[in-house]
Amino acid sequence: MLAIVAALVPLVALAEGPTAVTSVHLVKATEVRSTSKEQVTGSLSPSKTLPLGFEVGGRLSASRVQKGDVVKAGQHLGSLDAEIVSAQVAQAEAGVAAAEASAELARDVAGRQEKLKAEGSVTEVQSRSSDTQKRQAEANLLMARASLAQVKAARRRHDLLAPFGGMLVDAPEQVGGMVGPGLPVYVLQQLDPLVLKTTIPEALRAVVKPGLKARVESVATGAGTDDATVRLVLPVADPQTRRVPVEVLVPNADGRFVANSLARVFFPVGDAQRAFTIPTSALGATGGEHVFVIDSGSRLKRVAVTVTARGLREITVAAVQPLTEVVDAPSAALVEGAVVSLR
């Protein structure tokens, strides 16, 4: 008999009305102006990626950077052994010096012959011969200078410079090994800005255009920025998904985002409307997204909301009524109409 009575007690309580909750904690809801947003997910990629190698082969004699270093455009990365090509440069410089001396001598002889010709002391043939020798010497000088420029260019190819600023994500750990022409030795990536590549429905092309500001948040860490900018909207839909490719530039000077990770991008697609920011913990999801408020009779009232923006600690919601304070961390036991007290 006692067991039957005990089993009937909850039923009697339900018949009498909602069970009172001892206490709840309220948190502030702040009114803001919010714009409806279209959320899509994409991959954050480096804005530039380039494997770097030497144009010529040889032995790696020096590496002036390490993996993970941030380098500037034009910074010296590494060098090949240049003993042989340096000797060729010295030889070519000597050749230029000899050609300059020969050309100077030929020009002097030709000048003197021209004067003697005017005085009638030499024949026309002798004068032309000296002039031809002068031109030949000057041509030899030009060839010597071209040879010097060629070996100097070959010498420069033994040094590798960064073509743009970025981070080295790969670099040799030791020197002394042989490398072939064009073989990647370093990998350079520009991580500020990053590029988020994603797709949008074709209907959004009228709203999402180059230059549009958007919010980007990391899926893994929640780090975000409101300064992302649409860089490109291709006028070609994917043949499989019928969605339009979009690229978004994401500033990353402080390194808050990780390249090649997933991120969400929020495109504003409507006019600004009244909304409220609340802690993420205040949102209830059972039976649809909602929050609880307390009326003048200290009773719970359930208010349906629509999330317009999500952050790591706060969310923005649109509601059918103004919100000033909402119940924090609502449990599944909370029911509308229950009498509560504040703690």
Image (tube, rainbow, N blue to C red):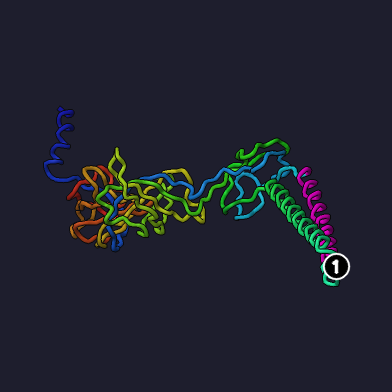
The percent coordinates of residue 134 (x first, y second) are: 79, 60
Quadrant hosting residue 54: top right
Q: Residue furthest left?
A: 15
Q: Is residue 148 left or right of residue 122?
A: left
Nearer to the camera, 192 or 307: 192
In which quadrant is the C terminus drawn?
bottom left
Badge 1 marks a residue whose secondary structure is helix
Instruction: Judge whether 13 appears above or below 252 on screen.
Output: above
Q: Which residue is mark 1?
A: 112
In which quadrant is the N terminus drawn?
top left
Verify whether residue 157 appears in magenta: no
Nearer to the camera, 135 or 26: 135
Q: Amino acid at mark 1?
A: Arg
Quadrant hosting residue 105: bottom right
Q: How many marks?
A: 1
Which secondary structure is most common in the magenta stretch? Answer: helix
- Tell me which residue sits at (79%, 61%) in the image: 128
Characterize the local packing of mark 1: few (<14), some (14-19) or many (20 or more) Cα atoms within 10 angstroms. Answer: few
Instruction: Judge whether 334 appears above or below 96 on screen.
Output: above
- Tell me which residue sits at (13%, 39%) in the image: 12
- Tell me which residue sits at (40%, 55%) in the image: 231
Residue range corresponding to the magenta coloring: 83-112
Residue 303 in view of the camera: yes
The percent coordinates of residue 172 (x first, y second) are: 65, 40
The percent coordinates of residue 111 (x first, y second) are: 82, 67
Verify whether residue 102 appears in magenta: yes
Residue 31 in view of the camera: no
Q: Is residue 53 left or right of residue 102?
A: left
The percent coordinates of residue 313 (x first, y second) are: 38, 52
